[in-house]
Image (cartoon, rainbow, N blue to C red):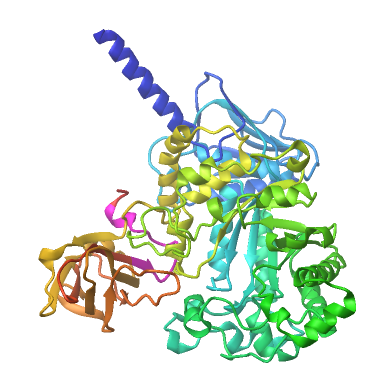
Amino acid sequence: MKYLLIIWACLCTLFNLQAAEYSVVPKPLSVKETGKPAFVFTPRTVVYVTPASRQIGELWIQSVSRSLPFQLQLKEVSSVKGKNGIVFDLSKKNRSSEAYTLDVSDKRIVVRSEGLAGLFYGAQTLTQLMPPEVVGKEKLEGDITVPSLQINDKPRFQWRGYMKDVSRTFYSVDVLKKYIDIMSLYKMNTLHLHLTDDQGWRVEIKKYPRLTSEKATHYPVQFGQPEGRSGFYTQEELKDLVAYAAARHVQIVPEIDVPGHCWPVLINYPELAVNDSFYPDYVMPFCETYHVWGHQFTPNTLDPSNEKVYQFLDDVFTEIAAIFPSEYIHFGGDEVRHILWEKNEHIQNFMKEKGMKNVMELQSYFVTRVSAIIAGKGKKPIGWNDILADAGNLPENAHIMSWLGSSAVKDAAKYGFPTIATPASHLYFDIRQGTPDDGLLSDLAYPYAITLSDVYGYDPAEGLTSRELDCLLGVQANMWPAVPQEVKDINLQNFPRLLGLAEIAWADGKKDFADFENRMNTQYKRLDALKVDYYRPDCHVIATWSPEKVSFIDYTTWEFDVTDKVYDNGRAMAGLFYTKGNDRLNIKSMQLLENGKVIAEDLHRGFADETRTTGKRKNYLYYLDVKNYQKDAKYTLRMEVSGYRGTDSYGNVIFSLSPYVPFQSVESDKTGRK
């Protein structure tokens, strides 16, 4: 028995080593071990390319060169046949092919595909077979090897997407490029940019310059938003971004959200509005809308009966089509406040003239007009699945992005509309991953959590007939940064869930979450090397409080050592997340100390209680700037608190620092991965 246990332990160890060696996400279709010695990188290793595959080879070398202890040589040849080294072989010119093979022996690594996209994806698999730190900046030590094997791989879905809302929070081109790098590493191929919403218009339209005026793109100072959260992209910046993405085989799909969610249009071009409500005459952060309008929705929309609206949209989409070569343009169409149309006399008269029985028919009229405009630019129109309410009157060329309701994908597919699955139940990454008390910023309008297991377990094809399955283009995750706004905060929401999405979008549909979790152990190291923060339970919690720590007569001073949580210049968020008890906790102030000296303070008065919704002002959160970080200093969080009417209060003390410059440092640089 003793010897059997030893043998079993050895087999388990071997299995785990092999799993770590082949820790590729998404999982390839087939992997065959050859039993040959591994390929070893040396200073003499040559990367062979043909003129057709040169760009792939150059990009791959660029992605790993910062960490290699020597420079790889690139050599262009007319034929790669028989070459020893690393070979990128474009076997045919089938540009649409995303399939590839990867053959590794001790003498050569051959990445082969009929298409440039497939060749690029094979290169990403090669990167993942190397040590995870190869994508970082630190020089690797020791032998760098790739195991001998044969991989045959292709994607399950053609649309493998991620949506970033840059209206509610603006992000720089550099941040978007970093996301493109990460997406392409995991074989995702579509970045959907939500460029316009009630919180800001983010794309330059030269014919309508007021769309990018101060009041349409910048939050007023009274809302306390950092300057970097406002702004817009010039057309030249977006063209540069499109080229960067195209080189990495990522298409960028632009969205201009109409006829609702377009406050920046209405306050700048009021002649396009359905009514005379224009207060306030500026854009504001999403959470503030609840305090102005009582909910998140504006008191106005575009006027679907006004021909000037369609001329405006024709002009806008003309410029959008010239910026983005993608075959798709998204026009939104979601969450339109039809009550504003129902109460409007001239809209009702227009509906009677057109023989429309209800406002959903009017919405379909609008969608048909907009779809024709987009099709006239040589593009395919996409709308959110809200437009399906009058599916019988929708234009045949409509594409549906299905987010609302468990049957949204099937509802679109049964009518024959091409559809992308992006259900809020599984793929809205602004929704929390764990407890609402862990200090991570998430959209608490949704009462549930979406775990990594939930994402991985989602199958967009479930319940579809073969005919309906033909309509399913693929899957997409969405990030709405209304509550999580800092890059670190959205990274904590996106990762590791984005890797779960990548796997269900690419892999063949067979699920083994235990195997995926095992492969993720290596991916976490890769994310560390990329300087990407990712979710860990309670990663913001630095302490807890309970009644014995609370006084309700006088304010008590609490201090906590946050040295391990301060690792760069940045904006620190501290707060108190109440979890239970009869009494709330009053907060007088918070300070951050460096070696005993106050370097930042936030003196507003707040309180921690059970109410923590998306629409509530977060006065239990405090912001403290670290402007001159000292590596060897001791950092202390100090606060003054008291119980309100009593001491029966429990909760979590949270602290998180978001570096001013994203993707340059992560918390694990200082503490290691815990």
Location of residue 261 by image quarter: bottom right
Q: Is residue 182 visible?
A: no
- The answer to whether 664 appears left or right of 568 in the picture is right
Return the x and y of residue 224 as percentages of the image width and height: 42, 83
Q: Number of callouts in the render? A: 0
Extent of the magenta region: 657-671
Q: Nearer the viewer, residue 534 or 301?
A: 301
Location of residue 213 by image quarter: bottom right
- The answer to whether 12 appears left or right of 550 in the picture is right
Return the x and y of residue 524 as percentages of the image width and height: 41, 46
Q: Residue at x 24, y 10 (%)?
A: 2
Q: Nearer the viewer, residue 292 or 96?
A: 292
Q: Is 659 contained in the magenta span?
A: yes
Q: Is residue 307 above or below residue 429?
A: below
Return the x and y of residue 495 as percentages of the image width and height: 46, 53
Q: Quadrant of the N terminus?
A: top left
Q: Is residue 389 above or below residue 408?
A: below
Return the x and y of residue 190 as percentages of the image width and height: 66, 55
Location of residue 469 by image quarter: top right
Q: Is residue 483 above or below residue 382?
A: below
Q: Is 627 contained in the magenta span?
A: no
Q: Residue at x 55, y 44 (%)?
A: 72
Q: Is residue 449 visible?
A: yes
